[in-house]
């Protein structure tokens, strides 16, 4: 993983609960290109997620990756220009209860904090 000493990141905090879904992916997913050099982009990943909204996390992850391969031309020998990592996390009543037990009432909160550059 590369770090940019000049980078600045905003803090984002959201409450997650049963029925919520979190999608994590590397830039290699949205920057992957078609044979005509068109990027997959955020709109396509959002559309694919909406179309698979009724799927469990595992099949949805497989579906998004299958759509990405199809978009790239379906040629299994055509590699990606960058790493491609995708994770779908579903918040279920049991996972939310475990989080509350481990972390207190805010157990379902996801918090991303800015990391200051080294001085």
Image (cartoon, rainbow, N blue to C red):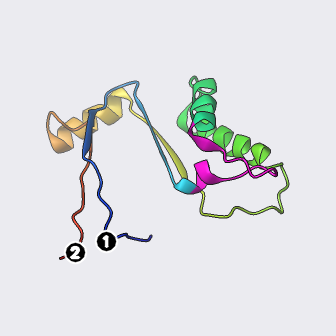
Q: Nearer the viewer, residue 93 or 70?
A: 70
Q: Residue furthest bottom?
A: 119
102 displayed left or right of 51: left
Q: Relative to 64, does residue 114 appear above or below in the rendering?
A: below
Secondary-structure class at tag 1: loop
Query: What numbered label is drawn on residue 31?
Result: none
Q: Residue 37 in magenta?
A: yes
Which residue position is annotated with label 1? 5
Query: What numbered label is drawn on residue 118?
Result: 2
105 displayed left or right of 93: left
Q: Quadrant of residue 102?
A: top left
Q: Relative to 78, does residue 29 appear above or below in the rendering?
A: above
89 displayed left or right of 12: right
- Callout 1: 10 Å neighbours few (<14), some, many (20+)? few
- From which residue to which does the magenta span run? 28-42
Q: Residue 114 in magenta?
A: no
Q: Quadrant of residue 46?
A: top right
Secondary-structure class at tag 2: loop
Real-space Cα separation, disc 2 to disc 1, in angstroms? 7 Å
Q: What secondary structure characterizes most of the magenta part?
A: loop
């Amino acid at each position: 993983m590369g770090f940019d000493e000049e980078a600045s990141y905003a803090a984002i905090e959201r409450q997650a609960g049963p029925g919520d879904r979190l999608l994590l992916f590397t830039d290699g997913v949205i920057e992957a290109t078609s044979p005509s050099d068109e990027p997959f982009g955020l709109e396509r990943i959002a559309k694919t997620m909406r179309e698979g909204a009724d799927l469990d996390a595992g099949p949805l992850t497989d579906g998004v990756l299958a759509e990405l391969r199809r978009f790239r031309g379906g040629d299994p020998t055509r590699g990606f220009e960058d790493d491609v990592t995708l994770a779908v996390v579903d918040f279920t009543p049991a996972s939310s209860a475990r989080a509350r037990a481990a972390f207190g009432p805010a157990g379902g909160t996801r918090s991303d904090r800015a990391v200051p550059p080294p001085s």
